[in-house]
Image (cartoon, helix red, strand yellow):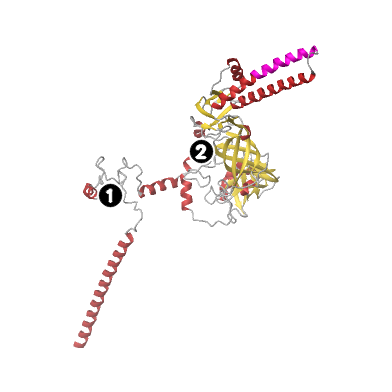
Amino acid sequence: MKRIIWIIGLIFVAAGTVALTSSLLKNTEADEIDHSTHNHESHRPGEVVMSDWCKEHLVPESECTQCNPSLIEEFKASGDWCAGHDLPESHCRLCNPEIVFPQEEQIYVAEISSDWCAEHSVPESECTKCNPSLIEEFKASGDWCAGHGLPESHCRLCNPEIVFPQEKLVQIQRPEIPDEGVEVSLFFRPNQDVCATNDALIQFASPLTAEKTGITTYRVVSAKQESTTKAPAEVLFDENSTSVISSTVKSLVSRWLISPGDIVEKNDPIAILQSPEMAELQAKYLSAAAELEVQKQELERIESLRAKNLTTLSEYERRNALYKKARAELTGLRGRLLSSGMNNQDIDRLLDSGSVSKEFIFKASASGLIAQRIAQVGELLEDGQPLALLTNPSSLWIEAHLTEDQINRVSMGQNLVFSSDDGTLNRSSGKIIWISPYLDPHSRTGIVRASVSHAATNLRAGDFGTALIMETSNNELALVPKDAVQWEGCCNVVFVKEAADRFRPRKVAITDGPDSYYQVTQGLSAGEEIVVNGSFLLKTELKKTSIGAGCCGIEPVG
């Protein structure tokens, strides 16, 4: 009996030991879990803690001295205090308006990232394709591109430099894709090889049902392929219509009478020059004029004697030769005075007055625009050294800098359209008159020059902008209305009519075309019939999140 009681006691003692051990293990595990949880909730260095943000004062909550005045002394002790505004210097936006906290950047990113239409690559809140009700508002504000049916501020065809803040975020957040020779287009996204569009078919319940949906079709036509080359460009004066104004005597610029940009007529005063050589040249001219008069009178006397046979023929010929020599010398000196800057009226006045001067007014030899004043006031110029540049303001060049592959695709006589960087919608056009036979060794670009035939009202030499060169090849491509093409999430598709109640989506590769048409480079042939009005309705049937089977009697099969 005692042995049984002893055994039972041992069993109870063992059970108690196990329970105690289990309890200790649980407490230990709990401590480890708490410690692990604490470690998990701790923040890594450099991590932006969005919960640490004071929305009222727009600073980190843990540093907000307005919510936690006890922090003030700590900031003052560290020398980080703006006494003028009672804020830490690192928080004072009045003194440091460039301050941006990491939390603000995260809030900004979150806000603008949510406002993005991935299908049309514009902010969702401004997308006129998804929200047609916005169209009138854009038109009323004057922000509308009638040629492409988009707000001008969204039209990348007219303004290829458009970049929305959301796009920069997408580029940052998008995983890097290795460049394997794939050309990226700003306007037309590439199709996926395999997607839900493959082998899809949209079948209406009946031809009558299809007719009730308002679907209209278009028979595809073909046209010669067109493409556009874009390159940076600059407007220049036509060098063939530009001339250098200079004097043929050594002179000093005493005073300018015109400014760059002034329009001058022939014989208008340009500058007042001083030249000892001019005084000497004028004196020679007066002397030559007097000599010519003497020789003229002597020749007339000899001719009178010759008529009476009172002199010999040789004497007459000698006097005639002397007269011609004096006349030639006078003509040469008159030409030198004209090339020096005087005009015929100035020379006639010189003959009448008979006085010479080292100071003279330099006159314009032709009409035009003063493109540049080269000489400085007080500068002594050698004979022939340029004073200024005179050009024809209505004769301009556009020089575009094309890459090696671009310049190989252009030819003489092609049209070039220039769009200035000034933000206006004005366009100037011309024809290509010269293509550089060599490339710049540093930039690896070549110059293509066009003569402006139609200039915008504000086109000026020195303007920078973008040149667009239209290229037409002998290859014929299908043309389709832009409303017929739908982006269904991964591919550009059109809907080909196979029967009155059956339509098949077809992937197409597109590029920009004339007016309201796309050029189809792959996937469609001329003569096929495609849906225009109603293509958006058919697109929704391809998307699982769309209106679903049965709407309007449409039932996708296949």
42 and 300: which is toward the camera = 300
Give the extent of the magenta segment. 290-308
Q: In which quarter of the image is the C terminus?
A: bottom right
- Left or right for 489, reference 453: left
Q: Quadrant of residue 236?
A: top right
Residue 122 image position (x, y, % from top left): 50, 43
Is 447 placed above or below 342 here?
A: below
Residue 349 is inside the magenta segment:
no
Tell me the kind of residue under disc 2.
Answer: Ser
- Left or right for 177, reference 212: left
Residue 316 image position (x, y, % from top left): 76, 18
Most extreme residue toward the left, as rendered?
A: 2
305 and 525: which is toward the camera = 305
Question: From where the camera sits, is residue 520 visible?
Answer: yes
The mark found on residue 153 in the picture is 2
Determine the CA span between mark 2 and mark 1: 41 Å
- Left or right for 245, reference 326: left
Q: In which quarter of the image is the N terminus?
A: bottom left
The mark found on residue 522 in the picture is none
Q: Chief secondary structure of the magenta span?
A: helix
Q: Read off the residue under disc 1.
A: 63
How many numbered circles does the render carry? 2
Tell me the kind of residue under disc 1.
Answer: Glu
Q: Quadrant of residue 456?
A: top right
Residue 315 image position (x, y, % from top left): 76, 19
Q: Residues within 10 Å of mark 1 (few under 14, many from 20)?
A: some
Question: From where the camera sits, is residue 459 visible?
Answer: no
Q: What element carries label 2?
A: loop
Is 64 placed above or below 37 here?
A: above
Residue 79 image position (x, y, % from top left): 25, 48
